[in-house]
Image: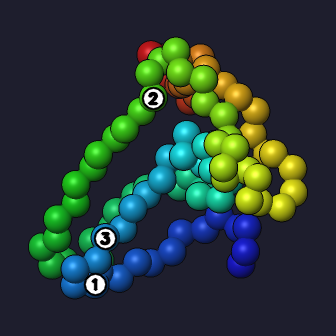
């Protein structure tokens, strides 16, 4: 249902891409694109290709909803500005990981 976070099956399709977004893209788009927890289960047992690519801001970058995205949306700004390195350190700390 709309707004619920649940696991979904994504069937492989010829010449298609699946793109998983992360926390900063969610913040930049004011929630238009939702960050998702990504896990893969190859239920069909057929060979498939998975390529992970991570792109992150500089640790001192200020990350806030982009004005061009926010002004096109109805409703309030959902995300405050964060300094990426500070946010990342807090995220690691909350999971018990050491940065």
For marks 2 and 1, the one nearer the N-term is 1
As drawn, 25 above or below 60: below
Q: Position of residue 57 (x, y in %)?
A: 45, 29
Return the residue nearer the eye: 76 or 91: 76
The answer to whether residue 53 shows anywhere in this view is yes
CA distance separating discs 1 and 3: 8 Å
**Element under disc 1:** loop
CA distance separating discs 2 and 1: 32 Å
Horizontal side, residue 56 vs residue 7: left or right: left
Q: Are marks 1 and 3 in contact (CB under 8 Å)?
A: no
Residue 19, image quadrant: bottom left
**Neighbour tally class for label 2: few under 14, some 14-19, many 20 plus, Cα within 10 Å:** few
Return the residue nearer the eye: 30 or 46: 30
Numbered mark located on residue 13 in the image:
1
Q: Mark 2 = which residue?
A: 57
Residue in the image at 81% along x and 45% along y: 77
As drawn, 47 above or below 59: below
Residue in the image at 54% along x and 46% along y: 25
Horizontal side, residue 73 vs residue 41: left or right: right
**Neighbour tally class for label 1: few under 14, some 14-19, many 20 plus, Cα within 10 Å:** few
Q: Where is residue 99 in the image (x, y as percent from the top left)?
A: 44, 16
Q: Position of residue 39 (x, y in %)?
A: 40, 58
As drawn, 45 above or below 61: below
**Element under disc 2:** loop
**Element under disc 3:** loop
**Neighbour tally class for label 3: few under 14, some 14-19, many 20 plus, Cα within 10 Å:** few
For marks 3 and 2, the one nearer the N-term is 3
Q: Mark 3 = which residue?
A: 17
Residue 79, image quadrant: top right
Q: Which residue ends up furthest to the left in the rendered image?
A: 47
Residue in the image at 79% along x and 45% along y: 78
């Amino acid at each position: 249902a709309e707004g619920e976070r649940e696991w979904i099956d994504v069937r492989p399709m010829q010449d298609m891409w699946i793109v998983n977004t992360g926390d900063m893209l969610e913040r930049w788009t004011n929630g238009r694109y939702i960050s998702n927890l990504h896990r893969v289960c190859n239920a069909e047992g057929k060979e498939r290709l998975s390529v992970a690519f991570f792109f992150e801001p500089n640790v001192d970058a200020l990350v806030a909803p982009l004005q061009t995205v926010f002004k096109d949306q109805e409703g309030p700004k959902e995300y405050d500005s964060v300094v990426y390195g500070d946010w990342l350190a807090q995220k690691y700390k909350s999971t018990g990981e050491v940065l």
